[in-house]
């Protein structure tokens, strides 16, 4: 796509919804890991999401690309599918066995810092400005304040370092696929979301079988958790993510990742009785300031002042 990002009120609403949904996902993953191995959790989640997305896609006519794909575009599509679902879902599920959910949240916030330089060189209309750089730095400072040292506490497990690297690698996967997705030719967002999950399922299921053996039979509670993960933060959220990246651009989409750790803390306090850190309000203020500075032009257009 060569056009400049089109950031509207709808874009802001979709990003807010994604931040809320993904903010609660790590809590659900931790609960699901009590009854399911990590790679099969990723496989079941992606498989369920792919079936649901494909069903909706076919009901809407089954449209995909407006013109036949070239060889490089086909390769990009497969790479995006693997790096946007199969690989990061497996990495997060495995990594969360050894790291805190706080560290996972900070890792997701780093996506914004990874996307910024990539978009500058690879996506037309997404050039770095001093406002963007300053805004993302302020926002990341807010995330770091929110999570504090708890996110980096050591459990002493020798697998903790690989677990942290797995979470950071998952964040890098999301950053790269946001860029590649924006560069695809004109495509129906519902179809693209469904195809990405379908290819991801074909990638992760053999991986789970090879590493963890035949699929286990989860209990009823775990099945409900997997169904939720497949339906909401996978199928529905993946469609929103595709839509935002394709219209508003990967840099704007990366703002979602500043919200994720905030919602993870708030939902943990509301649903699990976890304590709210005193620094929450200051962290929220920094994050909102960072978003405001980095998206100053879009906010002016949104409120009709530019």
Image (cartoon, helix red, strand yellow):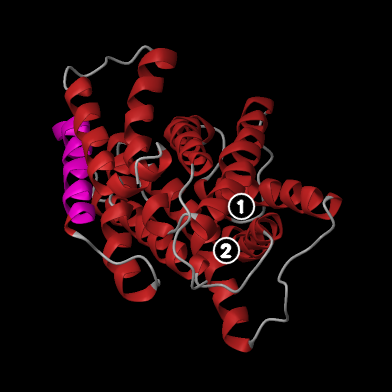
Magenta run includes residue 164: no
Closest to the observer: 171 or 9?
9
The residue mark sitting in front, 2 or 1, is 1
Write the start and end of the magenta stretch as one range: 131-154
Q: Residue 155: which quarter of the image?
A: top left
For label 2, the crowd category at 10 Å Cα-Cα, with few meaning under 14, some 14 to 19 and many 20 or more, is some
Residue at 44% of width from left, 64% of height from top?
4
| Residue indicated by mark 1 | 43
In the rendered image, residue 249, in percent from the top left (x then y), is placed at 44, 58
Precedes in sequence: disc 2 or disc 1: 1
| Vertical arrangement, residue 79 with respect to residue 277, above or below | below
In the rendered image, residue 114, in percent from the top left (x then y), is placed at 29, 60
From where the camera sits, is residue 262 visible? yes
| Residue indicated by mark 2 | 207
- Element marked by disc 2: helix
Residue lying at the far front in this picture: please name it.
305
Closest to the observer: 291 or 156?
291
Closest to the observer: 30 or 136?
136
From where the camera sits, is residue 154 visible? no
Magenta run includes residue 137: yes
Q: Residue 283: which quarter of the image?
A: top left
Residue at 72% of width from left, 78% of height from top?
67
For label 1, the crowd category at 10 Å Cα-Cα, with few meaning under 14, some 14 to 19 and many 20 or more, is many
| Vertical arrangement, residue 245 with respect to residue 289, above or below | below
Residue at 31% of width from left, 55% of height from top?
168
In the rendered image, residue 55, in percent from the top left (x then y), is placed at 81, 49
User: Do tag 2 and tag 1 residues touch (Cβ < 8 Å)?
Assistant: yes
Closest to the observer: 173 or 133?
133
- Element marked by disc 1: helix
């Amino acid at each position: 796509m060569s056009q400049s990002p089109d950031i509207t009120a709808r874009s802001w609403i979709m990003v807010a919804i994604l931040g809320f949904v993904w903010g609660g996902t790590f809590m659900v993953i931790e609960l699901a890991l009590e009854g399911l191995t990590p790679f099969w959790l990723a496989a079941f989640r992606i498989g369920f999401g792919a079936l649901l997305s494909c069903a909706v896609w076919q009901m809407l006519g089954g449209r995909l690309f407006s013109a036949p794909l070239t060889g490089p575009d086909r390769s990009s599509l497969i790479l995006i599918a693997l790096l946007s679902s199969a690989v990061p879902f497996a990495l997060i599920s495995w990594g969360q066995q050894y790291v805190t959910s706080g560290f996972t949240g900070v890792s997701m916030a780093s996506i914004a810092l990874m996307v910024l330089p990539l978009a500058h060189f690879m996506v037309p209309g997404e050039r770095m400005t001093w406002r963007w750089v300053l805004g993302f730095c302020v926002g990341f400072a807010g995330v770091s304040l929110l999570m504090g040292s708890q996110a980096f506490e050591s459990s002493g497990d020798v697998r903790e370092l690989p677990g942290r690297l797995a979470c950071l690698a998952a964040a890098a996967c999301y950053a790269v696929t946001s860029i590649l997705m924006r560069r695809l030719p004109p495509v129906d967002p519902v179809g693209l979301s469904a195809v990405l999950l379908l290819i991801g399922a074909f990638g992760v299921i053999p991986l789970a079988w090879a590493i963890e053996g035949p699929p286990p039979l989860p209990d009823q509670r775990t099945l409900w958790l997997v169904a939720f993960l497949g339906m909401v933060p996978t199928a529905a959220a993946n469609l929103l993510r595709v839509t935002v990246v394709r219209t508003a651009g990967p840099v704007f989409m990366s703002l979602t990742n500043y919200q994720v750790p905030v919602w993870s803390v708030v939902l943990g306090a509301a649903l699990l009785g976890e304590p709210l850190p005193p620094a929450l309000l200051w962290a929220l203020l920094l994050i909102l300031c960072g978003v405001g500075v980095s998206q100053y032009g879009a906010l002016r257009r949104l409120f009709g002042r530019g």
